[in-house]
Image (spheres, rainbow, N blue to C red):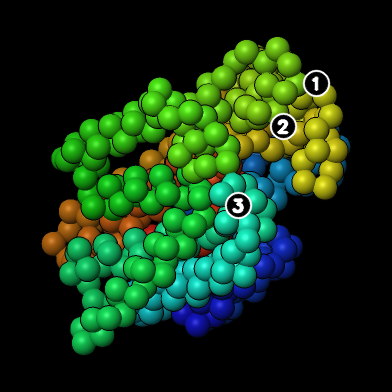
């Protein structure tokens, strides 16, 4: 099972969404056969809230194009499938270490690939424009950040994942993965890693508040960078300085402003569309298939669009499609993951502490990434995180 998981984690970033979905179905079905088709009650319970959110989205679906409805349905279904697959795989495996090492090893391999791509396109790096690098190489892999986090927290909680004699191995893993993280030039990955580390250490629970202070100071420092660093999309720190404007900019007097601060603009248009709904629609959403008119035609990927179905802010995406009822359900769902991790982190058992810390860390990653890159609804980037969350809950449910 761990080997099959490792193979999926390595290949998933290079597979299309359809193939990835099929692979998850196959793995989940395989795990079900190994469990004699007895799906644990907790696994079924984990599907209640995602199922309710899908039901809300379908309420308004008949008024929209079938193709758009199916796309939204898939975006809502995929995370639940990934979490369920991770849960079933963990429930089938007897030991925690091989499963966690599958994530660590996959992160190392993907980091090596990313760094090799960086070397192969060193000309783009020499230009000094990080956009050239990301265009040529890509935005890196979330597993590059998850891998060292797993290794660090395992040592912090006293759970051995690597042989005690292999002292050079953990150092090598840290060097490879963290170097890859740096060269992603991704604000989301780097900020998620730091905030997830704070959560994973257990510094943000009902009993410990130091993490809240550290997170507030960190976020405040990032948002305040614009006061001391010029905004510049060609440099990483320049992009950090633009972070506040990208989510709070409101003076869209020209199309150039809208494109430059796209995240803020699409959020504004989505909220306007949501605000135009009836009381019932605001409660349960405008339904799967609802598009947001952005007022002009823009090139998104290979397609010119004047209406968009998905937004960078995943919380706004939930609000538009399933209303404030769906948003509340989604937040409850994330809180349940985090509280499970917090309770487990208080256990005297080091392994449960590790699983709890990682659950809090991965939930934090989802919370942060959903705000800026759709996170929970971004299967290409976040599939590994969803699988890990399901696996962690699966192991905790057995103990």
What residue is shown at x 76% (from left), y 24% (from top)? 294
- Which residue has dot 1 on it? 295
Q: Tell me how far mark 3 sits from mark 2, CA to CA.
A: 45 Å
For mark 3, give the secondary structure. Answer: loop
Q: Tell me how far mark 1 sits from mark 2, CA to CA.
A: 21 Å
Q: Quadrant of the C terminus?
A: bottom left
Residue 267 in picture, x, y percent from top left: 62, 25
Q: For the residue carrying disc 2, how many other residues have a C-alpha within 10 Å: few (<14), some (14-19), or many (20+)? A: many
Q: Is residue 39 visible?
A: no
Residue 138 in picture, x, y percent from top left: 62, 57
Q: Are marks 1 and 2 in contact (CB under 8 Å)?
A: no
Q: Nearer the viewer, residue 292 or 176?
A: 176
Residue 219 in picture, x, y percent from top left: 36, 33
What residue is shown at x 51% (from left), y 48% (from top)? 186
Compared with residue 301, is residue 233 higher up or lower down, i.e. above or below? above
| Circle 3 or circle 2, nearest the eye | 3
Q: Nearer the viewer, residue 254 or 193?
A: 254
Q: For the residue carrying disc 1, how many other residues have a C-alpha within 10 Å: few (<14), some (14-19), or many (20+)? A: few
Q: Earlier in the sequence, mark 3 or mark 2?
A: 3
Q: Tell me how far mark 3 sits from mark 1, CA to CA.
A: 35 Å
For mark 1, give the secondary structure. Answer: strand
| Circle 3 or circle 1, nearest the eye | 3
Q: Is residue 270 left or right of residue 90?
A: right
What is the number of the mark on residue 59?
A: none
What residue is shown at x 57% (from left), y 19% (from top)? 249
- Which residue has dot 2 on it? 287
Q: Is residue 136 left or right of residue 204?
A: right
Where is residue 195, by image quadrant? top left
- Which residue has dot 3 on it? 127
Residue 157 in picture, x, y percent from top left: 19, 64
For mark 2, give the secondary structure. Answer: loop
């Amino acid at each position: 099972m761990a080997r099959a998981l490792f193979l999926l984690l390595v290949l998933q970033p290079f597979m299309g969404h359809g193939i990835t979905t099929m692979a998850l179905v196959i793995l989940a079905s395989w795990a079900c056969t190994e469990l004699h088709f007895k799906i644990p009650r907790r696994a079924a319970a984990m599907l209640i809230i995602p199922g309710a959110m899908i039901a809300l989205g379908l309420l308004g679906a008949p008024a929209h194009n079938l193709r758009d409805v199916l796309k939204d349905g898939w975006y809502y279904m995929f995370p639940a499938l990934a979490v369920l697959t991770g849960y079933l795989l963990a429930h089938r495996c007897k030991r925690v270490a091989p499963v966690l090492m599958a994530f660590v090893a996959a992160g190392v391999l993907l980091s090596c690939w990313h760094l090799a791509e960086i070397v192969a396109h060193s000309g783009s790096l020499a230009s000094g424009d990080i956009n050239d690098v990301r265009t040529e190489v890509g935005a890196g892999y979330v597993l590059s950040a998850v891998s060292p986090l797993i290794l660090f927290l395992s040592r912090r909680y006293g759970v051995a994942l690597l042989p005690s004699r292999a002292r050079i191995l953990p150092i090598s893993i840290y060097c490879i993965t963290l170097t890859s993280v740096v060269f992603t030039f991704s604000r989301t990955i780097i900020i998620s890693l730091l905030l997830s580390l704070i959560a994973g250490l257990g510094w943000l629970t009902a009993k410990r508040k130091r993490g809240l202070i550290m997170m507030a100071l960190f976020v405040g420092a990032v948002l305040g960078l614009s006061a001391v660093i010029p905004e510049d999309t060609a440099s990483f720190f320049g992009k950090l300085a633009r972070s506040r404007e990208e989510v709070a900019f409101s003076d869209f007097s020209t199309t150039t402003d809208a494109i430059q601060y796209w995240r803020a603009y699409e959020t504004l248009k989505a909220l306007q569309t949501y605000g135009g709904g009836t009381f019932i629609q605001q409660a349960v959403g405008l339904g799967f298939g609802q598009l947001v008119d952005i007022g002009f035609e823009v090139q998104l990927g290979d397609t010119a669009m004047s209406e968009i179905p998905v937004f960078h802010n995943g919380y706004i995406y939930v609000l538009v499609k399933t209303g404030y009822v769906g948003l509340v359900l989604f937040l409850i769902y994330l809180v349940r993951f985090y509280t499970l991790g917090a309770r487990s982190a208080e256990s005297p058992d080091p392994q449960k502490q590790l699983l709890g810390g990682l659950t809090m860390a991965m939930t934090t990653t989802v919370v942060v990434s959903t705000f800026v890159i759709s996170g929970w609804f971004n299967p290409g980037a976040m599939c590994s995180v969803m699988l890990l969350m399901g696996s962690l809950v699966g192991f905790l449910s057995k103990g």
